[in-house]
């Protein structure tokens, strides 16, 4: 049979006489000695406790401040997002206005134009637009912006389409070269103004033009126009630059500088047959 732990249960009774003795000594001449001793022992503890308390208070204030900073940061983020949306809407509205104005100046009779937004541009020379079969878009449809040729529809989905730009390796077209001074707004007999014919193909990084006549008086900045049976109409592609100067070759070549920076396109038009 286990005996109860009497010592642990009544141990506090041993401290009562000690406390009484300490209190009585406080009224004697030994009081100063006791005060100095207790001060020596407990002053560091008091100082550490005080400093710890101050640090805890500082941390509490800092945490309270952080919560307010977080709220302020969130509100600033929301404000920045709102301003971005408003600014982007203004840019898109202006860009749409310019695109529509440019398009109206170059409408072809008996043709229907479907406005489309560019959803994505990729480095392979393609763009994705937000119209597809539901809008009666078909493979081979021509995509333009004003007088400029943008590309042809390559693949059609229900609500979107893939357009191959002239930069794409899958793109190649017959073109003609005109003098840079030719006014395309006037009704000219283009055959009498053609400097040379050629073929353009994409390399992803650029549009290369080949099979240019060696005898043609070509100049930097001459106009390059698409004239291909698959396109049917004539559209501006860009300007001629970097013309080769190899007298031993039977043909000349160069590079076409597009009218538009394709990666910046927002609105285009699909010529629906």
Image: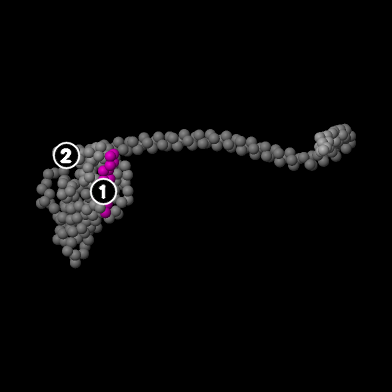
* Residue drawn at (83%, 34%) of the image: 10
Mark 1 and mark 2: Cα distance apart in space: 21 Å
State whether residue 148 appears in this view: no
Q: Residues within 10 Å of mark 1 (few under 14, many from 20)?
A: many
Does 159 appear in magenta? Answer: yes
Image coords of residue 77 (percent x, y) = 45, 37
Which quarter of the image is occupied by the N terminus? Answer: top right
State whether residue 16 appears in this view: yes
The way the protein has been coloured in the rendering is one colour
Image coords of residue 21 (percent x, y) = 87, 35
Q: Is residue 74 left or right of residue 43?
A: left
Which quarter of the image is occupied by the C terminus? Answer: top left
Image coords of residue 118 (percent x, y) = 29, 42
Q: Residues within 10 Å of mark 2 (few under 14, many from 20)?
A: few
Q: Nearer the viewer, residue 42 or 128?
A: 128
Residue 111's disc number: 2
Does 171 appear in magenta? Answer: no
Q: Residue furthest bottom?
A: 248
Question: Circle 1 is placed at which residue position?
Answer: 164
On screen, 28 above or below 169?
above
* Residue drawn at (16%, 43%) of the image: 185
Which quarter of the picture shows residue 33?
A: top right
* Residue drawn at (29%, 46%) of the image: 127
Q: How many marks?
A: 2
Q: Which badge, 1 or 2, is on the more N-terminal residue? A: 2
Q: Which element is circle 2 on? A: loop
On screen, 208 above or below 77?
below
Q: Nearer the viewer, residue 194 or 182?
A: 194
Q: Which element is circle 1 on? A: strand
Image coords of residue 239 (percent x, y) = 22, 52
- What residue range appears in magenta? 154-169
């Amino acid at each position: 049979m286990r005996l109860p732990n009497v010592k642990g249960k009544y141990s506090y009774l041993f401290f009562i006489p000690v406390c009484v003795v300490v209190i009585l000594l406080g009224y004697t001449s030994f009081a100063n000695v006791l005060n100095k001793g207790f001060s020596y022992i407990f002053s560091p503890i008091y100082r550490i406790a005080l400093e710890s308390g101050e640090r805890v208070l500082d941390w509490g204030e800092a945490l309270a401040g952080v919560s307010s900073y977080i709220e302020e940061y969130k509100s600033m983020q929301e404000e920045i997002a709102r301003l971005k949306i408003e600014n982007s809407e203004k840019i898109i509205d202006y860009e749409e206005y310019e695109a529509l104005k440019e398009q109206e100046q170059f409408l072809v009779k008996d043709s229907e134009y479907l406005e489309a937004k560019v959803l994505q541009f990729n480095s392979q020379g393609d763009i994705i637009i937000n119209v597809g079969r539901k809008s009666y878009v078909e493979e081979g449809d021509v995509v333009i912006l004003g007088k400029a040729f943008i590309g042809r529809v390559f693949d059609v989905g229900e609500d979107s389409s893939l357009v191959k730009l002239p930069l794409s390796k899958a793109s190649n077209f017959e073109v003609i070269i005109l003098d840079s001074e030719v006014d395309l707004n006037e009704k000219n007999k283009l055959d009498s103004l053609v400097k040379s014919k050629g073929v353009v193909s994409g390399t992803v990084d650029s549009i290369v033009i080949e099979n240019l006549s060696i005898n043609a008086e070509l100049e930097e900045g001459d106009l390059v126009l698409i004239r291909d049976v698959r396109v049917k109409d004539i559209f501006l592609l860009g300007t001629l630059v970097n013309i080769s100067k190899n007298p031993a070759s039977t043909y000349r070549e160069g590079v076409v500088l597009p009218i538009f920076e394709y990666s910046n396109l927002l609105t285009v038009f699909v010529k629906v047959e």
